[in-house]
Image (spheres, helix red, strand yellow):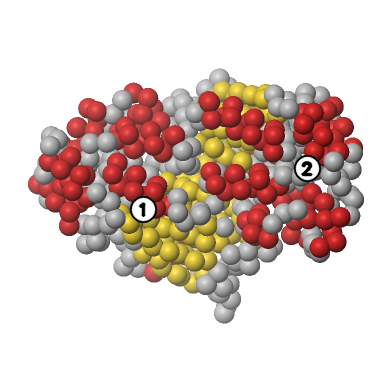
Amino acid sequence: MRIALFSDIHANLLAFKAMLKDMDSQKPDAVYCLGDLVGYHINPNEVIDEIRRRGIATLKGNHDEKVENIITTPESLTEPGKKYAYHLIREDNREYLRTLPAHIRLEYKLNGEKLNLVFAHGSTRSIDEYVLVDTDENYVLDLLAESDADLLFVGHSHKPYHRILKSADGVFKHVVNLGSVGKPKDGDPKGCYVILHLNADSSTANTDSTEIEFRRVEYDVEASVKAILESPLPMEFADALRLAK
Amino acid sequence: MKIALFSDIHANLPALEAFFKDVETRNTDAIYCLGDLVGYNIWPNEVIDEIRRRGIPTIAGNYDWGIGRSSDDCGCAYKTDEEKAMGKVSISYTNGIVKDEQRAYLRTLPAHIRLEYQLNHDKRNILFVHGSPRKVNEYLFEDRDEKSMLRIMEQADADIMCFGHTHQPYHRILNSGTDGNNHFRHAINIGSVGKPKDKDPLGGYVILTINPDSTVTDQDSIKVEFIRFEYDIEKAAKAVEESPLPNEYADMLRNG
C-alpha cells in the first residue's frame, strides 16, 4: 500500500500542477492532503477546485481557517497587501474550507496489533503548532501518546523530515513532516511531498517496516514569482519562493 | 462539504462503473470506500484496480480481510448448510483468481478511518467502519436495541458512524444527551453498490452533507441522501452463471 501525502500548497497553482503530475505517475493507492490550500499566492480557487474535483481527503490548515474571519467587499480586491490572497476565494470554496476536518486517523490492525496513522496540519493539539525536527523528544512522545498515534504526519512548518523516536515501552514511533508543495522553506525551491510505503509487516516493533519517501518536484518558479509580482500581494512572497525561506 | 460513501461492491464491476458514473454528476468533495471489494462475482481484481487508480481512501471489509490473508474464512454469518456450501465455493474461487498485488493491497487496508472535526468550537467525530467499531463482521441492523447502538457509538467516540456490511441502508438518529442537553448521534448504513439485500436490485450509496454550522445539539445539521442507481444487472448475473460460482448469487442480484 502506497499512500501519497501532501500539504501547504498555498495557492501556488504551477507548483501544485507539477506535484500532481509527479504523483499521478507514481500511482499511489490513496491520497491525503494535510491542509493550507490557500494564502500567499493568486490561485486559491483553482487549487481548491482541483482538490474537490479529485475528491481528495483533506484537512483544514491554519490559513484555511483564517478565511473564516475575512470579510470581502468589492474594494478589498484592489487593496495591496497579504489579505488579497484570501479575498480572492469564492464563497462556495470558503464554505468547503470551513467544513474540513482537523485530523484524519487511519486505524490499522495489521498483525493482530494496532497501528494508528494520524494526520494533522500543525499538531494534534493545535492547528498552528510547529512540530519540528528538533522539538524536544519527550514533548513529542507525550503528544504521540496523548493522541494514540504510532505514525504522525504533519505539515505547517514547510520543512520536511522523518524522525523515529523510541517510546518508554520500547516501541518505535514515527513523526513525518511533509514539507510544502507550494512554499518550501528548507532552502530548496522545489515542491515537496511524501509517499508512505506500508506493507503487511509494518509495525512499531522495528524501524524499517515502513518507508517514507520524500519526493521533490521541479516547477517553473520564475513564472510563479512573476504572477505574485504582478498582483497586489507583497513582493516578499515572491522572494520567498525563489529562496525557499 | 459533500462526502460520498460506498461499500460492498463484491466484485461487481458493472455496478461499480455505474456508481462512478452516477457520483461524478453529483459534485461531491470527498469519497470513501467502506470495504468488501471482493467476493460473489468474477471481477475482484478489476474492482480493486478501479478503486486504487482513483486513490480512494478505503477500509477493509470482512471479505477483504479473508482474501488479503488467503484465508478460507470470510467471517460471513451464513445461516444454513446450503448457504455455507455456496460461501465456500465463493471464497475458494475468489482466492483462486485474486492476483498477488491486489491481495497485498487488501492485506494493508486500515480497519477504520476517523475524521476529527472541530467545527464551531465543538468536537465531532465521523467514524467509518465496515461492520462495527468492535468487529469487522458484526452486523448492525436497523432494529438493534437503541441502548446497545448508543453504547457502541459512545465507546468508539463516534458522533456520526457510517458502516456497511448488512447491505440494507438506513439512517438512525439517537440522542445520548443527559440532563436535558441534546447530543445527537447518527448511525448510517450506506447500503451496497454491488449486492443489495433490501429487495431493491439497484445499486446504493450515500451522500453525507456537513453544514458549516453543524453541531451535535442540532439533529438536522447533517443531511444523509440515499442514492440508488441503475446498472447492467443482467451482465453481472450472467457473469456469475457462466462462472464456477453458484447460480443462486445471480438470482440474488436480479431480486435484490
Chain letter of disc 1? B
B132 with respect to A90 (left or right): left
* Nearer to us in this view, B47 or B177: B47
Tell me which amino acid carries mark 2. His
Q: Position of residue B81 (x, y in %)?
A: 10, 46
Q: Are marks 2 and 1 in contact (CB under 8 Å)?
A: no
The quadrant in which residue B125 appears is bottom right
Q: Are marks 2 and 1 on the same chain?
A: no
Element marked by disc 2: loop
Distance between mark 2 and mark 1 Cα atoms = 42 Å
Q: Is residue B126 above or below residue A121?
A: below
Q: Is any part of residue A97 visible from this angle?
A: yes
Chain letter of disc 2? A
B26 with respect to A16 (left or right): left
Would you name the residue on which mark 2 appears? A41
The quadrant in which residue B177 appears is bottom right
Would you name the residue on which mark 1 appears? B164
The quadrant in which residue A149 appears is top right
